[in-house]
Image (cartoon, grey):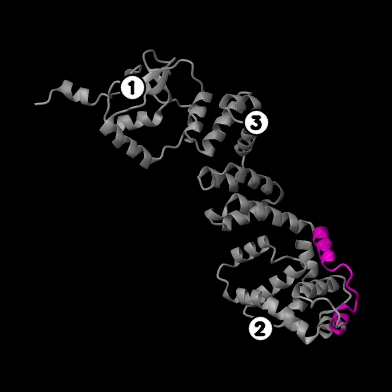
């Protein structure tokens, strides 16, 4: 028959040199500790390890000022929880009276055990008691920019906060860029977040989306770029280029569509005038270039992401070649017959609208 003393001994953690055996019921977790999230599977694995081998690394505790004879955990909350789950009655611990909240953060940062949310919460508490970013940075061994980057996530707009708090977004640089983007484009960013998949919310894709929004606002920049592409097209450029046999290169679709857009934009030509000036070969060149976007529209199953990816990639735009690509794409989406003149006419009709919206 096994005695009660034997059972008690089996539930006691093995001695560790230099550490004291402290009963688990005399230890409490620190309510202010930065770590709030504990992975259940990882904790269950640790519990099984402790059942088999005991606690090999002592936890650190300090005397509880509110209750004599008890202790508060400095670090080792996972081992403490797992030991209780394993049925132990005591745990090896070092008593360390020179310990601070910053030490807990450093300990967990070194182990890469803190989430971005937990780091932000810690920095928020320190800022609330009057500590500067520089002071906090020294306490946890990080740069002031690291602290400032995390501090920016203390007050997030609701659409971003929901993703951050739920753990969908964890990269602090991505969150910082989203917050900056939201200040200038709240409606656009909210829509993008609502329609984006978690795997789309990467640092590079957020930067691409912001650049798209910024370029959309810069109509002057768009027109400058268009002018650089076709700076000196004379009014009879198309006719001359076909007749000039010594021309160094054949006009490609980009040249032709840029020329057409500039003429439509300046209101020097109507769509029907453009069609008359184009040779059959030029019409074929343009049609072949636009038909791939028309075909993509016909096959499209995810309209939002198809448009968004093409906007970010520079294939669609509200001006220049991108306007024709986008229009051809929508002809395909709407199952309209491919008709070059109608596509040019559609771009012409939408010039003012797109220039205001983009």
Quarter of the picture containing the C terminus is: bottom right
Callout 1 touching callout 2 (CB < 8 Å): no
Residue 118 x, y percent position in the rendering = 52, 35
Q: Which mark is residue 144?
A: 3
Whole-number angstrom distance, CA of label 1 to CA of label 2:
78 Å
Predominant secondary structure in magenta?
A: helix
**Mark toward the start of the polypeptide (1 vs 2):** 1
Instruction: Residue at 70%, 73% (x, y): give it.
Output: 327
Residue 132 visible in the picture: no
Horizontal side of residue 90 vs 97, given as left or right: left
**Mark toward the start of the polypeptide (3 vs 2):** 3
Q: Tell me if residue 163 is in the magenta stretch.
A: no
Residue 284 x, y percent position in the rendering = 73, 83
**The magenta segment:** 219-243
Q: Which residue is mark 1?
A: 92
**Mark toward the start of the polypeptide (1 vs 3):** 1
Give SS at disc 2. loop
Residue 246 x, y percent position in the rendering = 86, 80
Q: Is residue 67 above or below residue 190?
A: above
Q: Is residue 256 above or below residue 24?
A: below
Give SS at disc 3. helix
Give SS at disc 1. strand
Residue 86 x, y percent position in the rendering = 28, 32
Depth-wise, is mark 1 or mark 2 nearer the camera? 1
Callout 1 touching callout 3 (CB < 8 Å): no
Q: Tell me if residue 223 is in the magenta stretch.
A: yes
Q: Which residue is mark 2?
A: 337
Q: Is residue 131 above or below residue 321?
A: above
Instruction: Report which quarter residue 262 is drawn in.
Output: bottom right
Instruction: Report which quarter residue 354 is drawn in.
Output: bottom right
Instruction: Residue at 74%, 54% (x, y): give it.
Output: 214
């Amino acid at each position: 028959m096994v005695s009660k003393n034997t059972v008690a001994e089996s539930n006691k953690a093995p001695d560790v040199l230099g550490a004291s055996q402290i009963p688990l019921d005399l230890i409490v977790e620190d309510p202010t500790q930065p770590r709030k999230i504990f992975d259940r599977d990882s904790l269950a694995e640790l519990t099984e390890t402790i059942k088999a081998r005991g606690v090999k690394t002592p936890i650190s505790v300090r005397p509880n000022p509110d209750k004599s004879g008890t202790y508060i955990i400095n670090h080792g909350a996972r081992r403490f929880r797992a030991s209780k789950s394993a049925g132990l009655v005591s745990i090896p611990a070092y008593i360390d009276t020179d310990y601070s909240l910053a030490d807990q953060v450093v300990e967990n940062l070194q182990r890469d055990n803190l989430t971005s949310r937990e780091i932000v919460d810690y920095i928020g508490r320190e800022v609330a008691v009057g500590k500067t970013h520089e002071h906090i940075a020294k306490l946890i061994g990080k740069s002031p920019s690291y602290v400032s980057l995390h501090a920016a996530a203390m007050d997030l707009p609701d659409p971003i906060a929901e993703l951050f708090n739920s753990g969908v977004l964890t990269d602090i640089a991505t969150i910082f860029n989203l917050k900056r983007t939201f200040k200038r484009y709240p409606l656009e960013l909210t829509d993008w977040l609502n329609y984006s998949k978690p795997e789309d919310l990467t640092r590079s894709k957020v930067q691409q989306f912001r650049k798209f929004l910024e370029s959309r606002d810069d109509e002057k920049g768009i027109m400058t770029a268009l002018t650089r592409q076709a700076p000196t097209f004379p009014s009879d450029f198309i006719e001359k280029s076909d007749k000039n046999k010594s021309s160094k290169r054949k006009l490609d679709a980009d040249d032709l569509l840029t020329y057409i857009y500039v003429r439509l934009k300046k209101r020097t030509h109507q769509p029907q005038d453009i069609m008359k000036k184009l040779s059959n070969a030029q019409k074929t060149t343009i049609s072949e270039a636009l038909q791939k976007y028309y075909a993509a529209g016909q096959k499209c199953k995810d309209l939002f992401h198809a448009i968004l990816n093409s906007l970010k990639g520079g294939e669609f735009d509200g001006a220049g070649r991108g306007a024709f690509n986008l229009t051809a794409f929508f002809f395909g989406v709407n199952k309209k017959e491919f008709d070059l003149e109608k596509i040019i006419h559609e771009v012409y009709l939408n010039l003012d609208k797109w220039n205001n919206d983009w």
